[in-house]
Every structure is written in C-alpha cells, then in structure tokens.
Amino acid sequence: MTEFITKNEFSQRGNTMNFDDMLNTNKKTKTPAKAKKANAEITPVPAAIQTEIDNLLAAKKAKKIEDSNIKKAEPTIIDFGIKLKDEKAYSGKFQKSYKIGSDDNHVNFVTANKWSFKEDDVDEIVGILGDKADNMIVEETEVKLKADVFKNEELKAKFVEMVGAEFPEFFETVVSHHVSTDFDAKVYDLPEEDYSDLKLLMKQSKPSLR
C-alpha cells in the first residue's frame, strides 16, 4: 500500500522528497469501479424452480408491454403538464409539482431543477439572461494536472520544486481501489474460512434475473 504522509513530515524531509511523496500528502478515496459481468453456462434446475423461472419471464414480458404503453401515453401528459406549469408560473404561482387528472385517476407531474446545455452555448445563454446571469449560472473550476507530468521525471521534479510542501493547500490526490478482472474466480483459491471473513467486508453485486 502507498504511504500517507503529512504536510509537516513533507516539510521536515526537505529536498529528499520526490513527486510521489508529494502526492501522498493529501490523498482521499472514492467508490471502486464495478466488476465486469461474466457469461455463464446454462445449468438445469428442478421443475419447481423452472416453473418460477417461466413465471418470472412471462411477467417480465408482460411488463415490457406495459412499459411500452406507458411510453406512448407519457409525452402527451408531460406536454400538458409543462404548459400548465408555465401558465401558472407566469401568473406568479410557480410550483415544482402538480396533481393532474380526476379525483379517481390522477398523476403527479413533477419537475426538477436539472438542466443540460453545451459549454459552447454559455455566452449566448448569458446574453439571454442579461443582468440575471450571475445569479442563475454558476461557474465551477476544476484544475487537473496534465497526464504528461506523471510520465516525465523532469516535469515532476520541476513541479515539486515549485509547489513543494504547499501541495495539500491547493490540491488533493484521490485514491481508489478495485478488484482484479478475475477476482471472483480467485476468491475460491482461498480457504473457505478466509472467504467467509472476506464476505463480511466485501459484497458482490446482486445476481440479476432478466
């Protein structure tokens, strides 16, 4: 495992520090990547289980038909909801959600403050918003170290010289771990008691039935 060192330790080591030591002064972790799915051979099952599999697949097929009907009905309802929201909002009665339909049969029309747009269109958007732009469009800046720096010893040394012990004041190093591509096979090379202990700390994704 990589050694974690503090800013003070970094300063005390002085010129003996290198690029990797500097990165280790401010590390964080993130959620590991999901393991890739693997194909499996078809295994025969008892009749009772096959019956349930048949029932499941029949239900899923019926669900696909229902999902198709939902997709056909949604656009018209959503279009009505948008027009209703716009009309009420412009009259000073903005809401994020509305119940539309009859007392017996109605749906919740819900909107969320999530917007997507191209960066190339930002200037035009700001122009449309005018004086309100500063309060409506938030600009966020993320600084990344060029990938070439990690491959060039001269650049790494230069970066350490410029930033040095002040690295954690401005940057953070995010560390993540993930299993090997054949991890799910290799666990069976472990003694059963070790694998049992491992399962207390690591959970494999739930098997899916499609």
Image: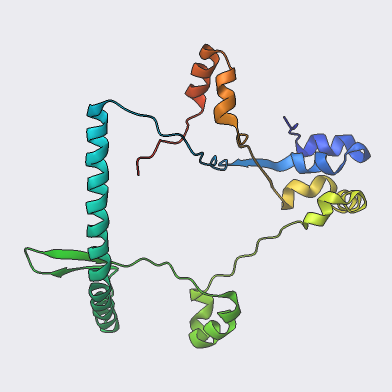
Give residue 136's position: percent from left, percent from top: 48, 75
Point out the image quarter for the N terminus.
top right
**Image height of 195 relative to 113, above or below:** above
Dividing the picture into quadrants, the one containing residue 120 is bottom right
Residue at the far left: name it. 104
**Image height of 181 relative to 109, above or below:** above
Colour convention of the picture? rainbow
Give residue 60's position: percent from left, percent from top: 27, 48
Which residue is at the front of the view, 15 or 149? 149
Dividing the picture into quadrants, the one containing residue 139 is bottom right
Give residue 24's position: percent from left, percent from top: 75, 39
Which residue is at the front of the view, 65 or 146? 65
**Image height of 45 relative to 160, above or below:** above
Left or right, 104 with respect to 74, comes to: left
- Residue at 14 percent of width and 65 percent of height: 106
Give residue 111's position: percent from left, percent from top: 32, 67
- Residue at 35 percent of width and 40 percent of height: 209
Left or right, 207 with respect to 158, comes to: left
What count of labels does the image hold? 0
Point out the image quarter for the C terminus.
top left
- Residue at 52 percent of width and 13 percent of height: 192
Which residue is at the front of the view, 132 or 32? 32
Left or right, 12 with respect to 196, comes to: right
Dividing the picture into quadrants, the one containing residue 97 is bottom left
- Residue at 52 percent of width and 80 percent of height: 133
